[in-house]
Image (cartoon, rainbow, N blue to C red):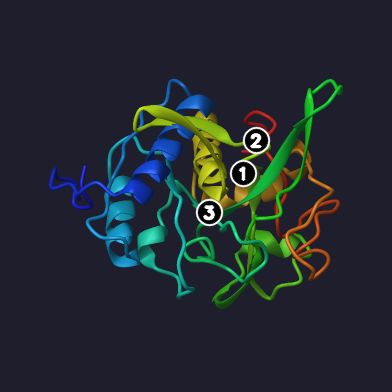
Amino acid sequence: MDERGGNNLPPDDAGWDLDQALDVDMVSSACPDCKILVVQGKAPNLKSLGHAVNTAAKTRGVLAISNSYGGGERRNDPAYRHHDVAITASTGDSGFQGPLYPASDTHVIAIGGTSVFRDGSARGYHETAWAGSGSGCSRVNRQPAWQQAVDTSCQTDAAADVSGPADPTNGGLSVYINGHFSQVGGTSESSPMIAAVYALSGRVNGLPGGIPYAHPGKLYDITSGSNGSCGAPLCTAGSGWDGPTGLGTPHGVAGF
């Protein structure tokens, strides 16, 4: 549907179409039984995209909303604050560079990224922080109450909160579009994955961003890799919270 809930859809756009395909396929692969609704903004700007988020949040049955885009930072927008709906957003794909919006909104769950490698462990693979995963401290938006339980080195909202696979080479999703498969990734992959995990858990009461902070031990803590040269915790992964990967990656729906 369009940003107002109708069928006045925008024209095709090669870049956004690939992102849409990635988003939908990632949700479907993480939650095959989820019902997926695509709400399209009429223009690639935060005003239109905010209208789309509002429309999605007000649609009956919606538990989670994923946003795979980011722009220059701005103050909290009511469009991205909805009780009983998990709203996720990508932190960006250029490493430590300061926050992108809407990931830097106090009420949005900021999603970082990891690189995934097969190994001989019982799990079958391990993860490190992806070098492209965005992180940073907001310049204008306050720290959410749940982040006060961890040392982010920020006095404001910090990215990321949690993370998922994002490295196009090591963990990228194979997407079929325009007649062929493309292996793609970025935090445009991890954001819809985390939204799908929230939908699977069904635990979205209140403002769901705080739920992982109440159960950090139930996530896979990512303790290696970095996205820049600023050190720990904003650039270098380590025990507990860090900028590139937040609290870690999902272990099923535990922690969500």
Residue that mark 3 sits on: 90
Number of numbered callouts drawn? 3
The three-letter amino acid code for the residue at tag 3 is: Ser
Give the label, 2 or 3, closer to the camera. Answer: 2
Q: Secondary structure at mark 3?
A: strand
Q: Earlier in the sequence, mark 3 or mark 1?
A: 3
Query: Marks 1 and 2: CB-CB under 8 Å?
Result: yes
Please tell me which residue lies in front, 173 or 254.
173
Q: Quadrant of residue 173?
A: top right
Residue that mark 2 sits on: 171
Relative to residue 207, is residue 28 depicted above or below?
above
Q: Are there few (<14), some (14-19), or many (20+) residues within 10 Å of tag 3?
A: many
Q: Position of residue 149 (x, y in %)?
A: 74, 60
Q: Earlier in the sequence, mark 2 or mark 3?
A: 3
Q: Earlier in the sequence, mark 1 or mark 2?
A: 1
The quarter of the rendered structure image containing the C terminus is top right
Q: Position of residue 78 (x, y in %)?
A: 37, 65
Q: Quadrant of residue 236?
A: bottom right
Q: Residue at x 28, y 37 (%)?
A: 60
The quarter of the rendered structure image containing the N terminus is top left
Q: CA distance from mark 2 to mark 3?
A: 16 Å
